[in-house]
Image: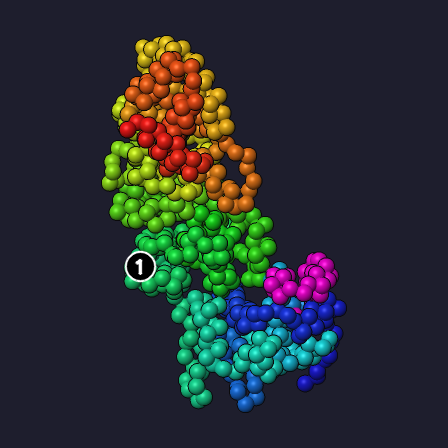
């Protein structure tokens, strides 16, 4: 047979050198590329035989075979698919038929970072070249059903040989003459059948075609991939136990999933998704270094484990698989971030997860209650980060409220119970339900029968200011701004009272000027003497603490002291103000009233030791 020696295209030569001396850390992926190529070849043959009834090809046992020869240190990946013609081999392997190749090679040569190198390599469809990371020589024998067989061989040094092989079997066989194992260079022993099985299980377990390998010398080849792509099978054919087993496989969680979600998109961009909502929050749900995202497959070939681009941060607990039909096998994270199809998939996946939770509220209320208890605090982060789905998130949210001490309420249920003339959804944030329930801010609202949402998650401090409202009703904090609860008659009485208290309130404001912005009469108190409130757009004390803990410098926020004019202490303090010219002791009493208001809401005293000293003196004088 005539052997012809040809040169690689110059860019291909450079690429081969980079592969041979690669710092590409995950060398196992060479096998993923070869198996994927073999799977594609089988798909193409099956399709071609449907299209062309005159094509003579054996399709009775389409499969992929992996053969290991430990003595010769060779690894062969063989398929009986469509194969290649001589021209195919020269054009597909001898040349990189991609635009921008020179720029790519320059970037690849310049990068010193392994992860960056991996991403750059991943941007080009150059899977076959990755064989030179693990092999000193590569031999390829192939035959297309309509052509003579061809043998291609190269050591990656700039040239390759090609010759005709008339008796070559249908399909393609790629034989790698393996380099010695080298732990320091992250080069495994690829003559180990255990290692090969491990790689196949990781990257190609769900490929449609059987992958056969003899796991012991002389043994009959056995199928080493499960071929069970649950997401590609009709849901009627998949049992709950199979879903549970697959969930354990992708999540490493031994509980059953709370809910299983299936999606199939057809048309211009096809993909399938099999997602799971866990029944229990992972321990690292709120840890920064946690991994998140779903597994990404392309045509059943595993691409990456934690594809963050397909699922937003606030749904980081969702597990599962997305299998796209039209993405490149070598897609990188950088490309995913900019890919329009990926963004479209993400939007649809998010809407599907949120709509599934919405259906749980009516169809499986117990499952919904479990979901919200475990993941509600994370989901509410989406109210800040995902304005597009804000209404959908509000619709599936539940909150503690003063209506029922045992059961949470949805916003829709709250709105249904609102009083006829009630314009706002009242809420109060705090560290715990007990603290909020005992807060003086709720007194008048409770007395008049208004329901108040009790928000105790740290994220609640932030989203309530970012979200305008729900179904046309605004959110209003009962601890900020003015709360309008009075009838017209009560407003007239309150105005007269404010005039009577004007001088006293001005004196209190001056006396406490270093601590408060203003002292005014309250409409929200019924039994407590005083409370401290913020202006409508002020930061809450909790949010102030959170920002300071993150190292942000903030100017001190002065709040407003509200007094209950009907409380004996306030009435007595005002009477003493009218009667006495020396108000030194009264100024200390004013300090105590402010301090008590801070303590009543669970706040911190500006000077605790002074508060105790002044209180002791006043108690002593009262004996």
User: Does the rendering let one see residue 453?
Assistant: no
Q: At 68% from the left edge and 79% from the top edge, which residue is drawn?
A: 155
**Quarter of the image where the C terminus is located:** top left
Q: Nearer the viewer, residue 509 or 393?
A: 509
The quadrant where residue 278 appears: bottom left
206 left or right of 358 in image: right
- What secondary structure predominates along the stretch shown in magenta? helix
The region drawn magenta spans 93-121
Q: Is residue 498 above or below residue 122?
A: above
- Residue with the mark numbered 1: 256
Secondary element type, mark 1:
loop
- Residue shown at the point (61%, 76%) measured from the top left: 185
Can residue 183 be seen?
yes
Could you say where residue 25 lies in the image, as x and y percent from the top left?
A: 59, 69
* Residue found 44% across the figure and 69% down from its top: 205
The crowding category of the residue bearing disc 1, from other C-alpha atoms within 10 Å (few below 14, some 14 to 19, many at least 20), is some
Quadrant of the rendering where the N terminus is positioned: bottom right
Q: What residue is at 53 percent from the left and 56 percent from the top?
A: 326
Given residues 256 and 339, the one toward you in this image is 256
Residue 399 image-quadrant placement: top left
């Amino acid at each position: 047979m005539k052997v012809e020696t040809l040169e690689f295209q110059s860019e291909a030569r450079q690429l081969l050198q980079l592969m041979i001396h690669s710092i590409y850390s995950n060398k196992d992926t060479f096998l993923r590329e070869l198996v994927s190529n073999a799977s594609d070849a089988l798909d193409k043959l099956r399709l071609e035989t449907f299209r062309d009834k005159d094509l003579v090809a054996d399709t009775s046992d389409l499969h992929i075979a992996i053969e290991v020869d430990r003595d010769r240190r060779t690894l062969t990946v063989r398929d009986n698919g469509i194969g290649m013609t001589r021209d195919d081999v020269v054009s597909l392997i001898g040349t990189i038929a991609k635009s921008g190749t020179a720029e790519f090679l320059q970037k690849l040569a310049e990068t010193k970072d392994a992860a960056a190198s991996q991403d750059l390599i991943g941007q080009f469809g150059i899977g076959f070249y990755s064989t030179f990371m693990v092999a000193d020589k590569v031999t390829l024998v192939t035959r297309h059903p309509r052509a003579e067989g061809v043998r291609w061989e190269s050591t990656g040094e700039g040239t390759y040989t090609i010759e005709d092989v008339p008796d070559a079997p249908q399909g393609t066989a790629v034989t790698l003459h393996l380099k010695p194992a080298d732990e320091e260079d992250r080069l495994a022993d690829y003559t180990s059948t255990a290692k090969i099985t491990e790689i196949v299980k990781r990257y190609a377990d769900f490929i449609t075609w059987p992958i056969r390998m003899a796991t012991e010398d002389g043994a009959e080849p056995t199928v080493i991939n499960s071929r069970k792509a649950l997401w590609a099978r009709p849901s009627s054919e998949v049992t709950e136990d199979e879903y549970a087993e697959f969930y354990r496989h992708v999540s490493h969680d031994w509980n059953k999933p709370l809910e299983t979600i299936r999606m199939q998109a057809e048309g211009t961009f096809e993909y399938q998704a099999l997602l799971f909502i866990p029944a229990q929050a992972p321990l690292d749900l709120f840890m920064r270094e946690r991994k998140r995202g779903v597994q990404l497959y392309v045509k059943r070939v595993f691409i990456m484990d934690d594809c963050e681009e397909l699922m937003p941060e606030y749904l980081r607990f969702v597990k599962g698989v997305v299998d796209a039909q039209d993405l490149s096998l070598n897609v990188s994270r950088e490309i995913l971030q900019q890919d329009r199809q990926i963004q479209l998939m993400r939007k649809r996946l998010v809407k599907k997860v949120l709509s599934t939770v919405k259906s749980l509220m009516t169809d499986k209320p117990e499952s919904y209650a479990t979901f919200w208890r475990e993941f509600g605090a994370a989901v509410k982060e989406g109210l800040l980060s995902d304005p597009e789905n804000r209404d959908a998130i509000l619709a599936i949210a539940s909150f503690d409220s003063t209506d029922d001490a045992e059961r949470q309420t949805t916003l829709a249920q709250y709105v249904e119970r609102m009083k006829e003339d009630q314009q706002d959804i009242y809420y109060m944030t705090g560290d715990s339900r007990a603290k909020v329930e005992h807060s003086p801010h709720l007194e008048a609202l409770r007395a008049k029968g208004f329901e108040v949402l009790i928000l105790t998650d740290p994220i609640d401090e932030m989203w309530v200011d970012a979200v305008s409202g729900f179904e046309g009703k605004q959110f209003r904090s009962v601890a900020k701004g003015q709360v309008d609860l009075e009838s017209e008659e009560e407003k007239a009485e309150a105005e007269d009272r404010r005039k009577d208290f004007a001088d006293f309130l001005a004196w209190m404001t001056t006396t406490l000027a270093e601590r408060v912005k203003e002292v005014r009469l309250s409409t929200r108190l019924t039994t407590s003497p005083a409370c401290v409130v913020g202006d409508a757009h002020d930061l809450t004390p909790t949010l102030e603490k959170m920002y300071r803990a993150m190292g942000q410098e903030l100017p001190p926020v002065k709040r407003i002291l509200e007094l209950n004019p009907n409380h004996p202490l306030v009435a007595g303090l005002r009477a003493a103000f009218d009667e006495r010219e020396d108000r030194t002791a009264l100024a200390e009493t004013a300090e105590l009233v402010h301090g008590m208001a801070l303590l009543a809401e669970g706040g911190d005293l500006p000077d605790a030791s002074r508060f105790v000293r002044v209180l002791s003196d006043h108690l002593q004088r009262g004996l």
